[in-house]
Amino acid sequence: MSAARTYVHPDTEDISLPRVLFALSEPLRLEMVRKLAERGEMDSLDLGPDLPRSTLTHHTSLLRESGVVFVRAEGRKCMISLREQDLESRFSGLVETVLSGYESDADQGHDDRAGGER
């Protein structure tokens, strides 16, 4: 029987703003964070069902190493949750602000396409 997978996470006080902002700067990772904020803990495969496993692992690892998410093994599953309380204690309002701006950008892009204007 194999040993359970363990994941290394930064302590709350070691979460740095540049690393969090870098993690949130990529649209795919930002979409993953949005899903986690809306739905809570999810199996990593549900965060990117159409992605190759290597791509999904890369992005979830970067989010974990930056302190944005918490990852835990549950049998064969890799469960991921947003570190909302830790991020809020370090950078009050940051995730909410970034996600609200992301939703506005997504809405604006949708409106542009619908109207045919650029």
Image: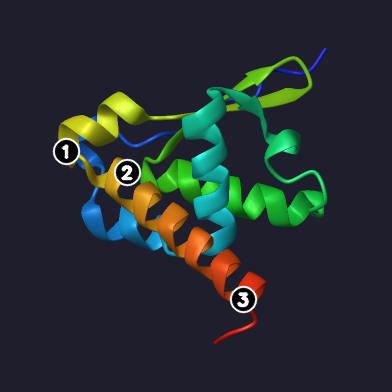
Amino acid under disc 3: Gly
Amino acid under disc 2: Val
Query: Can residue 104 be seen?
Result: yes
Query: Disc 3 and disc 1: Cα gap in Å?
Result: 36 Å
Name the residue tied to disc 2.
Answer: 95
Query: Can residue 70 be seen?
Result: no
Q: Which disc is residue 92 wearing?
A: 1
- C-beta proximity under 8 Å, tags 3 and 1: no
Label 3 crowd bin: few (<14), some (14–19), many (20+), radius 10 Å: few
Residue depicted at x 50% and y 42%: 34
Q: Secondary structure at mark 2?
A: helix
Q: Secondary structure at mark 1?
A: loop
Relative image position of residue 80 (x, y in whole percent): 57, 29
Q: Give the mark, 3 or 1, whose residue is nearer the N terminus.
A: 1
Label 2 crowd bin: few (<14), some (14–19), many (20+), radius 10 Å: many
Residue depicted at x 47% and y 32%: 37
* Quarter in which the N terminus is drawn: top right
Label 1 crowd bin: few (<14), some (14–19), many (20+), radius 10 Å: few
Amino acid under disc 1: Ser
Relative image position of residue 51 (x, y in whole percent): 79, 53
Query: Disc 2 and disc 1: Cα gap in Å?
Result: 8 Å
Relative image position of residue 57 (x, y in whole percent): 67, 48
Examine the rendered structure and indicate whether residue 2 appears above or below residue 93. Answer: above
Residue 42 vs residue 21: left or right? right
Q: Which disc is residue 73 wearing?
A: none
Residue 13 vs residue 55: left or right? left
Residue depicted at x 79% and y 49%: 53
Residue in front for this viewpoint, 12 or 4 = 12
Name the residue tied to disc 3.
Answer: 115
The image's colouring method is: rainbow
Q: Give the mark, 2 or 3, whose residue is nearer the N terminus.
A: 2
